[in-house]
Amino acid sequence: MELRQLRSLYVLAESGFSVTEAAVRLHLVQSAVSQHLSRLEQELGTELFLRQGKRLAGLTETGEQVLQYARRILNDTENILAVGRDREEVASGELRIGTTHTQARYVLPPVIRVFREIYPLVNLQIHQGTPQQLVEMADNGSVDFSICTEALGEHPNLTALHCYRWNRSLIAPKGHPVLERRPLALDTLCEYPLITYVFGFTGANHFRTSFARLGLKPRVVLSAADTDVIKTYVREGFGIGIIASLAYSATSDSDLQIRDLSRLFPWEVTRIAYNRDKYLRRYEQRFIELMQHMVADDGVFLPEVPGLRRG
């Protein structure tokens, strides 16, 4: 059994069982990938793939088990290589970050700007997904880190670290009557059509339970995973928006007014997570350090942090 056979199996599964796509990702000809897979089945003495004619359609139960071990072996191999690369004087490599739109758009840019100053030779990739997809990405090693609010702290295979806390704010066009209501309460919000995050994104679970505890049912007329989409439909007059406070920009959102809602909802925690068996290179440790120290516990970017080394 060879690593290249296990790598072909892993990439094939990640490519939706398309041998053509797997070959492109592996920089091999299709016949080489097919040969790797055939020899792996022969060595194990059992079928790994479900077939529809000549086409591979999925994995057998045995194939699923072999894939799990293949992932671990390939991750361990990458860890061994990372140990060696970490001895290089000039840090170079790749950092794959899985995250949601809100994090990618409103939190990560200043952190990445500083990271790039320190490690200009590290290639950065940002992969967006749902919270559940981000858990799976971190677990199977398709990203180095996942960053989001939901789900990361619950998976046994992940190390999840606190980055910062955040809460919500109401946004509405200037002059909207809700902006004059004093004080704002949950039952007040129920009087208006609401636009907020889709269930499973950016604290939506706690948002719903906050109303449910008081026997209230908010009138959510539109849900989205993307904060900018929420702002767009607030501007179109569909309703008032409830967003993460950190996603409001006084510059680009000057046509909208904001009201703090942190009295009404529980504080949320954004975490950064990685597979607990992953070897962290020095530049990966530094990225975690930046995430934990450059964003305050209200989601505000801190441009200068005492004691934070840049070299």
Image (spheres, rainbow, N blue to C red):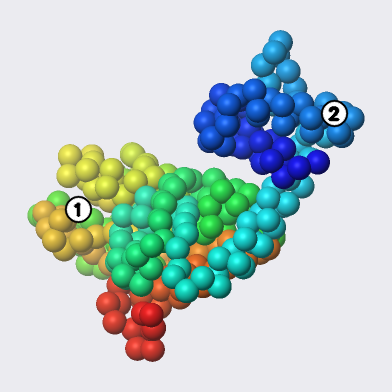
> Measuring 33% from the left and 39% from the top, which residue is drawn there?
221
Q: Secondary structure at mark 2?
A: helix
Question: Would you identify the image quadrant in which residue 245 lies?
Answer: bottom left
Circle nearer the viewer, 1 or 2: 2
Tell me which amino acid carries mark 2. Answer: Gln
Residue 53 sits in which quadrant? top right
Dividing the picture into quadrants, the one containing residue 189 is bottom left
Q: Answer left or right for 255 relative to 142.
A: left
Task: Tell which of 123 and 96 is nearer to you.
Answer: 123
Query: Which residue does the image show at 59% across and 63% down from the upper left?
Result: 82
Q: Which residue is mark 2?
A: 42
Residue 264: percent from left, percent from top: 38, 66
Relative to 247, 141 lies left or right: right
* Vertical order, 307 against 117 (above or below): below
Q: Residues within 10 Å of mark 1 (few under 14, many from 20)?
A: many
* Residue found at x 68% / y 56%: 77
The x, y position of residue 78, in whole percent, is 63, 56
40 over 78 or under it: above or below: above
Residue 108 seen from this side: yes
Q: Position of residue 191 (x, y in %)?
A: 29, 49
Whether residue 149 is visible, yes or no, is no
**What is the distance, in whole Å, between disc 1 and disc 2 at their CAs?**
64 Å
Pointers 1 and 2 in contact (C-beta within 8 Å): no
Give the vertical position of 9 relative to 82 (above or below): above
Disc 1: which residue: 172
Neighbor class of circle 2 (other Cα within 10 Å; few <14, some 14-19, many 20+) is few
- Amino acid, disc 1: Ala
In depth, the one of 12 and 88 nearer the eye is 88
Quarter of the picture containing the C terminus is bottom left
